[in-house]
Image: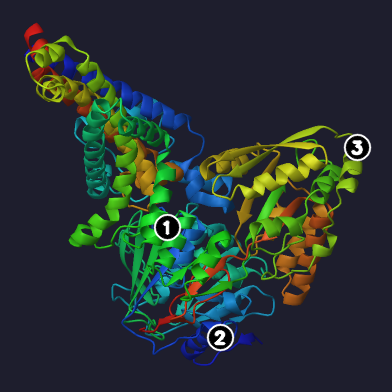
């Protein structure tokens, strides 16, 4: 007896999802004219990928541009439907009651951009490579897979060594992407996927152009071309939007949003993300290995005032954001109380403390400035060390050589980092580790979410870090653009359903 | 003269060799690791180790250096770790933006610096001359970034005459748009560099005005301005050529900054992105090419100086 997730003609459903997902929430940005199928959609983004090799190069920029648009896996997720898992190259799937066997029915009539047909062998090889090759990004997501096989041309069966409730979600990520077996395309500078768009051209330092894939298996893309225009300077991006060079601008500088809105040509929208602005404490290093010191630092931060300074963002009380399972509103635990902070520090014998904050230089300086004055107020001197991201990765992530660190952790469902004492947080709590392991191996989603919530509460109660804010980036969407997605755009930007009307 | 040129060429080669070693070493001291950047924040140490191996980062440093130099001798600047593209190809591609930008900026600097510098020297006792000199002093102290933002606000945002940022995707196939995209950045660099040149030309002109031969010429019946133009300016020109050699280096540095501000896909923006990605083989090729260019400009300036200055010509 199999638990079946049967889905009717899923091409239709996917199309319907894409259509309904956005119109529900942002009906105000409806089109003002008929969609123009020959239109080009120009989207302004800040972070350019360093190459196109999505298998071997990390970074949100690559996923954002290529997953769902150019490359696909058996399944994908819909950011505007609470990250629900929806079919892609598989039309349907079933999971055995013990949670160990996943059987996928492969969609028929799918071709790669080079014209060759998708086979079960392509799927098996792609997944097998992701599992075996250590250089595949997120390949470890498939570490628990014991066998990958295709009993017939339209079926792929994955067997796990133990149940993993996150497994389907992992397949929506890079590890699950399907590539052509024996592809000779130079995937560092070109692409060959099955998605609704082909990579048309990549002008490094400038833009990535996608073109509609006319041989796509599902609903054809709503625009003929997509130009992802990479503009690292925030004010230059706003100027470009105001000048009419962009149809959509993502991650608009909150301070400058009115300039864009005042043109009357854009609707300002904010979306949810799983992007957690994380102030990490080095839990392994004195005096931060003392819970009282960590609690004091959290109590010294006025989160409401910080978010006012940043203009956009939401309070987040714990490690799990609203879009992930196990979320619980823990913001009630955040209480700004400098007096209590001073008491705690005195109790811990940590008066006249000097700490260093290591922060990549891509983030606004308002964050460290705010922290410096907040901590000074309770007698903690904060030195700010602004480094580039490469140096942060080596010093903080790899060598754990830091007191405090700030980065935005954009990944969805990354709670596992709190259950891994070797991660740079250095947080080691046996109970959290055991709860997390149970949450993964249970086969019931609600049980899993409850276990995660319990573990997250412990992490927050122990003040393992402070979550300064949940990013809610601002997008300026042209009034002539319809069906633009809304949530988690910093990691996924599915553009197939977007239409542009001729003005 | 030939002996001088050969000695100078020898110096150039020594300079390049020293530069290559400095570039190579300083990049290896830089914290950060390309494998870690490729692997990202979810990669395990074992994955990073596998990446380092596959990228050839475990080869001893001295061997990496020798490999690089060996390639250079054969005319190969290296290959990007991330895209596999030859550095020379990338440089040629990006130079299509940076070279015209630098040429335009230099033109602006010359047009601003030389005539105004001479005028400000001639009018030094009048209000206009003093104003020019003070303005130049102030402009030369302005950071390029700030000048750029100001120009964008006025000419792109308020007046809407020129694009605020970017370069046409069609590149030089759309020459009008490409040129328009370069105007503001070139003026930004050119005005700041031109202000420095202005001050230099002014003091060189003032010095020439005080020379005996100008006074003698004036005594023979030329006006002071005529005397200066005929006899003084050739001397001013000589020192300007020397300064220009230095200013070309300044313009390149300015281009690196300004390409960020205006989102121009040129050598400067590529260099900054490659440093951020720790694509060291590519960065070292780019830096050496830029250093080589500046050294060659210096070499040419010295030769030209030698050729056109009769005193030096005869001395050799």
Residue mark closest to the camera, 2 vs 3: 2
Cα distance in 3D space between marks 2 and 3: 54 Å
Q: Residue at x 39, y 83 (%)?
A: A222
Q: Which of B86 and B247 is in front in this view?
A: B247
| Secondary structure beneath label 2 | helix
First reached walking from the N terminus: tag 1 or tag 3:
1
Q: How crowded is mark 2: few (under 14 residues within 10 Å), some or many (20 or more)?
A: few
From the top left corner, tell me how far across and down residue A108 is, in percent: 40, 85
Using the numbered discs, state the Cα–Cα distance from disc 1 to disc 3 in whole angstroms: 47 Å
- Mark 1 to mark 2: distance in Å? 28 Å
SS category of the residue bearing label 3: helix
Q: In this figure, which residue is indicated by the disc labeled 2? A: A27
Image quarter for residue A274? bottom right
Report which residue position mark 3 lands on: A346
Pick out the residue farthest to the bottom: A8
Chain at numbered mark 1: A
Relative horizontal placement of residue A277, taking residue B266 as reference (left or right): right
Q: Which chain carries label 3?
A: A
Q: Which of marks 1 and 2 is nearer the N terminus?
A: 2
Q: Which residue is drawn at 40% across and 41% down?
A: B144
For the N terminus of chain B, give its image quadrant: top left
């Amino acid at each position: 007896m199999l638990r079946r997730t049967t889905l009717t003609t899923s091409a239709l459903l996917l199309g319907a999802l894409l259509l309904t997902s956005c119109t529900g929430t942002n009906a105000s940005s409806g089109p003002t004219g008929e969609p123009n199928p020959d239109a080009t959609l120009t989207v302004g983004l800040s972070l350019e990928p360093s190459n196109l090799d999505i298998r071997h190069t990390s970074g949100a920029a690559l996923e954002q541009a290529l997953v769902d648009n150019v490359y696909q896996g058996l399944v994908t997720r819909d950011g505007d439907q609470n990250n629900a898992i929806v079919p892609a190259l598989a039309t349907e799937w079933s999971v055995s009651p013990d949670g160990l066997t996943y059987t996928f029915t492969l969609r028929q009539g799918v071709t790669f951009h080079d014209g060759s047909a998708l086979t079960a062998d392509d799927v098996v090889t792609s997944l097998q490579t992701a599992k075996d090759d250590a250089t595949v990004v997120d390949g470890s997501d498939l570490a628990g897979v014991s066998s990958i096989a295709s009993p017939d041309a339209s079926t792929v069966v994955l067997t796990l060594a133990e149940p993993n409730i996150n497994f389907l979600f992992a397949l929506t990520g890079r590890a699950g992407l399907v590539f052509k077996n024996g592809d000779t395309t130079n995937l560092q500078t070109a692409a060959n996927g099955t998605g609704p768009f082909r990579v048309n051209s990549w002008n490094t330092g400038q833009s990535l152009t996608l073109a509609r894939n006319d041989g796509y298996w599902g609903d054809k893309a709503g625009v003929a071309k997509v130009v992802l225009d990479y503009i690292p300077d925030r004010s230059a991006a706003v100027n470009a939007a105001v000048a009419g060079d962009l149809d959509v601008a993502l991650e608009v500088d909150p301070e400058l949003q009115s300039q864009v809105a005042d043109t009357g040509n854009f609707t300002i929208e904010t979306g949810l993300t799983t992007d957690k602005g994380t102030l990490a404490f080095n839990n392994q290093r004195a005096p931060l290995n003392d819970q009282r010191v960590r609690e004091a630092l959290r109590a010294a931060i006025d989160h409401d005032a910080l978010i006012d300074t940043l203009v956009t963002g939401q309070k987040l009380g714990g490690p799990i954001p609203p879009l992930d399972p196990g979320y619980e509103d823990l913001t009630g635990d955040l209480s700004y109380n400098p007096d209590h902070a001073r008491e705690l520090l005195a109790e811990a014998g940590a008066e006249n403390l000097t700490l260093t904050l290591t922060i990549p230089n891509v983030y606004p300086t308002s964050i460290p400035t705010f922290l410096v004055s907040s901590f000074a107020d309770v007698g903690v001197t904060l030195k700010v060390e602004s480094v580039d991201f490469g140096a942060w990765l080596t010093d903080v992530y790899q060598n754990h050589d830091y007191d405090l660190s700030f980065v935005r952790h954009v990944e969805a469902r990354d709670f596992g980092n709190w259950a891994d004492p070797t991660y740079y947080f250095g947080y080691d709590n046996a109970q959290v580790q055991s709860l997390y392991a149970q949450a993964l191996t249970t086969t019931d989603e609600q049980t899993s979410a409850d276990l995660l919530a319990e573990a997250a509460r412990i992490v927050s109660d122990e003040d393992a870090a402070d979550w300064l804010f949940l990013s809610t980036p601002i997008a300026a969407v042209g009034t002539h653009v319809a069906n633009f997605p809304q949530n988690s755009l910093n990691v996924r930007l599915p553009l197939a359903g977007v239409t542009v009307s001729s003005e | 003269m030939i002996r001088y040129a050969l000695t100078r060429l020898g110096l150039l080669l020594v300079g390049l060799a020293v530069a290559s070693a400095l570039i190579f070493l300083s990049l290896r001291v830089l914290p950060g690791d390309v494998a870690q950047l490729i692997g990202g924040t979810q990669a395990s140490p074992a994955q990073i180790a596998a990446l380092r191996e596959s990228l050839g980062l475990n080869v001893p440093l001295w061997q990496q250096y020798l490999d690089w130099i060996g390639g250079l001798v054969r005319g190969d600047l290296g290959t990007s770790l991330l895209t596999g593209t030859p550095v020379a190809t990338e440089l040629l591609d990006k130079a299509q933006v940076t070279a015209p930008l630098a040429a335009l900026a230099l033109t602006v600097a010359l047009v601003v610096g030389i005539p105004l510098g001479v005028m400000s020297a001639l009018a030094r006792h009048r209000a206009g001359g003093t104003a020019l000199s003070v303005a130049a002093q102030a402009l030369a102290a302005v950071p390029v970034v700030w000048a750029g933002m100001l120009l964008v606000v006025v000419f792109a945002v308020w007046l809407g005459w020129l694009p605020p940022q970017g370069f046409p995707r069609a590149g030089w196939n759309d020459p009008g748009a490409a040129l328009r995209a370069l105007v503001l950045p070139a003026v930004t660099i050119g005005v700041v560099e031109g202000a420095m040149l202005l001050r230099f030309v002014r003091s060189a002109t003032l010095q020439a005005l005080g020379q005996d031969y100008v006074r003698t010429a004036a005594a023979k019946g030329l006006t002071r301005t005529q005397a200066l133009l005929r006899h003084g300016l050739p001397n001013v020109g000589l020192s300007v050529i020397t300064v220009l050699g230095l200013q070309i280096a300044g313009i390149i540095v300015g281009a690196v900054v300004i390409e960020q501000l205006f989102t121009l896909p040129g050598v400067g923006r590529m260099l900054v992105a490659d440093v951020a990605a720790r694509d060291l083989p590519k960065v070292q090729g780019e830096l050496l090419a830029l250093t080589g260019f500046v050294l060659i400009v210096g070499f040419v300036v010295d030769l030209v100086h030698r050729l056109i200055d009769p005193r030096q010509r005869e001395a050799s």
